[in-house]
Image (tube, rainbow, N blue to C red):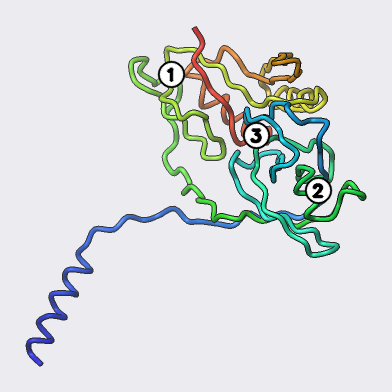
Amino acid sequence: MKHSFFVLSILFVTVFSIPYQIIAQEAIFRQEGIASWYGREYDGHLTASGEIFDSSKLTAAHPNLPFGTRLVVTNIHNNKSVIVTVNDRGPFVPARIIDISRAAAEQLDMIVTGTAPVFIESFDRVAVSPPVTEQARPVSAVNVSQPVVVQTPQIRLVPETTIMPDRIYRLQVGSYRVDRNAIDAFEKLKNSGLNPAYERHENGGTEFYRVVVAGVRGTEMQHVTERISAAGFREVLIREEN
């Protein structure tokens, strides 16, 4: 009996003396609204994520969820479901919350109707960043030899980049196949107090439109990303300008 008590005591000390780390809370994203679909006429076009659109794959466009997010989309009318991966931006039509590929629309039996009321839910649990408690230092207090820490948990920079105060950056907010969608994004950024640019490009005969905020100094990155986030965007492509 004494031996058993001794062993339990050792286990207790060992287990409860192990250092631990608090893990960020996880959550499930849920949304309800109208879904629409887009099909073969866009095959071969670039999506906002840079992938080539293929209507036979189970993909989707969402206004602001991170690219790569997997969603369960359920048609409320018939209770049919499909899992899609977000690789594009849209739809930019009031009351619509998601655009899905033709393949996904077939599984939901909404090809004929074109739209359907749906319930969407993240397939994987999404990590929720803890709130930022420390205020960012004012720009005037930043030493130009030190990196700038951008503390905007609502927005993601791709790729993850160390922001240097004395360098200039270009932020691509979106790349769109439909010019109207690009114009909508441009106007959202403009209304947020930014000075975006609207660019037309062509790749292999396919036209697409980019909306960018160029000439951003490292010392301005905090302010600019907060404005982009306020406009409803959650992810931007960043590169350093020469």
- In this view, the residue in front, 82 or 71, is 82
Q: Nearer the viewer, residue 28 or 52?
A: 52
Residue at far top of view: 242
The residue that appears at 72% across and 22% down in the rendered structure is 190
Could you say which quadrant of the image residue 163 lies in?
Answer: top left
The residue pinned by badge 2 equals 35
Q: Quarter of the image holding residue 211?
A: top right
Crowding around mark 1 (Cα neighbors within 10 Å: few <14, some 14 to 19, many 20+) is few
Nearer to the camera, 124 or 214? 124
- Point out the tag, 3 or 1, that comes first from the N-terminus: 1
The reply to whether residue 1 is in sight is yes
Give the CA distance from mark 1 to mark 2: 46 Å
Q: Is residue 199 visible?
A: no
Mark 1 / mark 2, whichever is N-terminal: 2
Say if mark 2 contacts mark 3, CB within 8 Å: no
Check disc 1 and report its element: helix, strand or loop: helix
Left or right relative to 46: residue 128: left
Q: Nearer the viewer, mark 2 or mark 3?
A: 2
Q: Position of residue 161 (x, y in %)?
A: 44, 26
Q: Which mark is residue 233?
A: 3
Check the image and name the residue furthest to the left: 2
Q: In the rendered image, which residue does mark 1 sit on?
A: 140
